[in-house]
Image: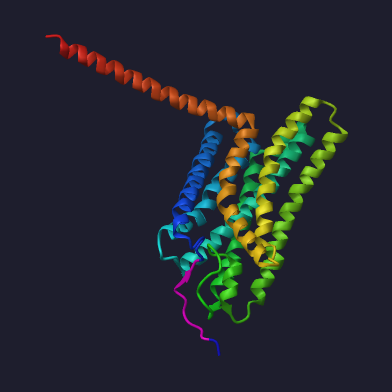
Amino acid sequence: MENITAVNEFILLELTSVRELQPVIFMTFLILYMTDLLGNGSILVIVISEPRLHSPMYFFLGNLACLDICYSSVTLPKLMSTLLSTRRTISFLGCITQLHFFHFLGCTEAILLAIMGFDRFVAICYPLRYTVIMSPQVCVLLAAVAWLTSFFYALMHSVMTARLSFCHSLKLNYFFCDVKPLLELACGDIQLNQWLIFMVTCSLAMAACFLTLLSYFYIIGFLLLKSQNCGVLRKALTTCGSHFMVVSLFYGTVGFTYIPPTSAGSVIQERFAAVTHTTVTPALNPLIYTLRNKEVALALRRLFGRKLKKVTDNTRRSQNCMLFLSRLFSHP
């Protein structure tokens, strides 16, 4: 019989066994994390504060920015702490919590990207009915459906994983807690968990990806067949280009992470894609949107311009005050 014991913690896989590289990797992750926080935080601030960006497209962009901040915060702080410490353990409750939020936020991003694709489809193909179809009430409802659906989807995985017994080594063959590496350590019947991954997870991911690609298929068809104006075509491609780059980056890394590896080299690629998906992608999203979206770039410039002007004015007032006091005390 297998030795079934109560599990209190798991041991995470280390990124590298070369001690000299660990500080370098730590600084790389720290820069990526700060870029993620500053970039997505700036987008969130301008979407809320800038009246010109109070539209459905930027409402969903704000949701995506908030999600990316949370997404990287689920795995990166723990990943960085393991690089500075010889203790790479995570508690059982912490592991299940990390698993839950990882799937919750990942699923939300997939659904949000599909909704953003639909938003671009309506804006380009039905511009006169855009404000009616994508009303504020509809936008809030779509965002709520994305967040709530993903929460209960992740709850399903976290509950079904938490009820398993673990009788093998407690050393996870992964950098953070996910369903697949935890199932490798489980004993007993895991067929239901595997079925849920195959049916529910794959169905949600494929449906979201299909709907996103379908929106772009109709957009491309509409632009090629009906739009004769080069200016309209250029503007449509510009607004869709940044979103399509984010979609490609998201599904590209997800595909490499969850397609079963066929060799040892594939396992290394899978782990590299997993790290890229959780660290690089959230940091690149704000850069992609600011570089390819003129409205976001201009709003950021105005925001930081106002902040810089305010700092300059305060500095000038302080200098004038100091000059006045020095003149006052220099004369008897």
On screen, residue 67 versus residue 93, left or right, reads: right
Residue 63 colored in magenta in the image: no
Estimate the x, y position of residue 173 in percent, counting from the top left. 56, 68
- In depth, the one of 273 and 294 nearer the eye is 273
Q: Nearer the viewer, residue 306 or 172?
A: 172
Q: Nearer the viewer, residue 313 or 26?
A: 26
Whether 243 is drawn above or below 91: the answer is: above
Q: Residue at x 60, y 66 (%)?
A: 156
Above or below: residue 241 compared with residue 8: above
Seen in the image, is 252 located left or right of residue 231? left
Q: Where is residue 195 in the image (x, y as percent from the top left)?
A: 69, 71
Left or right of residue 268, residue 8 in this image: left
Q: Which residue is drawn at 49% across and 44% down?
A: 37
Question: Residue 100: where, in percent of width, then height?
Answer: 55, 62
The residue sitting at 81% across, 39% down in the picture is: 220
Quick one: which residue is furthest to the bottom in this view? 1
Which residue is situated farthest in the top direction here?
331
Magenta-highlighted residues: 3-12
